[in-house]
Each structure stands twice: as C-alpha cells, then as structure tokens.
Amino acid sequence: MATQPKTLYTYADLERLPQDNLRREIIDGELVVTAAPIPRHQRAVVELTVAFHSYGGQHGGQVYPAPTDVFFSDSNVVEPDVLFVAADRLAQVEKKFVRSAPTVVVEVSSPSTRRLDLVRKRDLYERFAVPEYWFVDLDGDRVEVYRLDPAGRYGSPVILDRGNHVDSPLLPGFVLPVDRVLGPPEEEDA
C-alpha cells in the first residue's frame, strides 16, 4: 500500500488560514500551530519591545512583536515573539512581512514551544543567517544569546542569569537588564 505524500505548506497556504488566536508558522514546509501565550510570556515580550523601540528611536531601526511574519522562503515563514531590524536592514521590511534575516530575533519560552524554539527555530535562524537569536527561558530564569560566528554557526550560547544584562555588538549602546525581561521571580507554591 502506498503512503500518502506529506503535505508541504507554503506562504500562500498560510495566508488562506483563519485569523484567530493561534500562531501558525511554516518550517521546512510543515505547518506548526501553537496556542496563545500566557501573561508572563507577554509581559516579557512587552519589555523587549519597549527596549528595542527606545533603541530604534535613538539609533535607527524598527521593532516588530508577534504577529509579524518573517519570510525566509516560501516553505519557511515564522512569527518570532519579537524581532528587531537595524537601520541597515530596513529595506527588508515589506508590506506583508519582513523578508530574510532580521538583526535580532527573540523567542520567549512557553512549556508548549520550548523544543520548537530551542531546536527547530534555532536551527532555522542559523540556516538563514539571523545574526543574533535570543531565547528567553522563563522557567530557567535566564536569557540565552546565540551569535553567528564567522563560519555562520551559532555555537554555544552566552547564558545570562538574573543580575546580568543583555547587550549586543550589533546594537552599540543597547543594554537591557535580564531582571527586567524576566520580571519578578516566580514564587514557589506553598
């Protein structure tokens, strides 16, 4: 018995899907659907968005929180939680999406998306040469910063715990306390 060929999704398919509270992305032609995020996740997204917005206002560049599509190819379209496009890459911002690699892409962890963010999306961002990928680990209380090396690989991340700050050689003068991104420490259940 022949097996059914796997459906490969494209950006055109994505545009035909309903607009609801689900995040839909395409990675290597596979449709990936995730639920709406929790409040703590969104608070981190707001802090990052405000910091990038302030930086962009002073140094040029634009911040885009989800839902904003990043179009790498017809079979690779994702919605990072936050992305920043520096002034030298603003030509990539089109009417419907950001085409190719933003300067910085940020994913904020959720229990349901952790593996997706740390494996599939990290590999995708590396493959399409996103200069920096930040993973905000709310459960681990830290931020992991992946930077492309000269060979175009991320390698080991810079791990930033509470009390540290996130900065970037790509964004001179940008400094964001990790505590501000993570918010108040989660209290243990009694």
Image: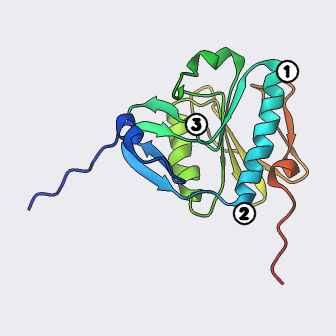
Mark 3 or mark 1: name the one nearer the start of the chain: 1
Measure the C-alpha gap from mark 2 to mark 1.
32 Å
Measure the C-alpha gap from mark 3 to mark 2.
25 Å
Mark 3 or mark 2: name the one nearer the start of the chain: 3
Q: Is residue 66 above or below residue 169?
A: below
Mark 3 vs mark 2: give the one in front. Answer: 3
Residue picked out by circle 1: 58
Q: Which residue is drawn at the image coordinates 53% and 35% (left, top)? A: 69
Q: Nearer the viewer, residue 96 or 153?
A: 96
Residue 55 visible somewhere in the drawing: yes
Q: Nearer the viewer, residue 5 or 12?
A: 12
Is residue 158 toward the left or the right of residue 4 in the image?
right
Give SS at disc 2: loop
Residue 158, horizontal then vertical, whole percent: 74, 44
Q: Quadrant of the N terminus?
A: bottom left
Q: Amino acid at mark 1?
A: Gln
Residue picked out by circle 3: 68
Measure the C-alpha gap from mark 3 to mark 1.
22 Å
Mark 2 vs mark 1: give the one in front. Answer: 1
Q: Amino acid at mark 3?
A: Thr
Q: Are marks 3 and 2 in contact (CB under 8 Å)?
A: no
Q: How many marks?
A: 3
User: Farthest residue in the right direction?
Assistant: 163
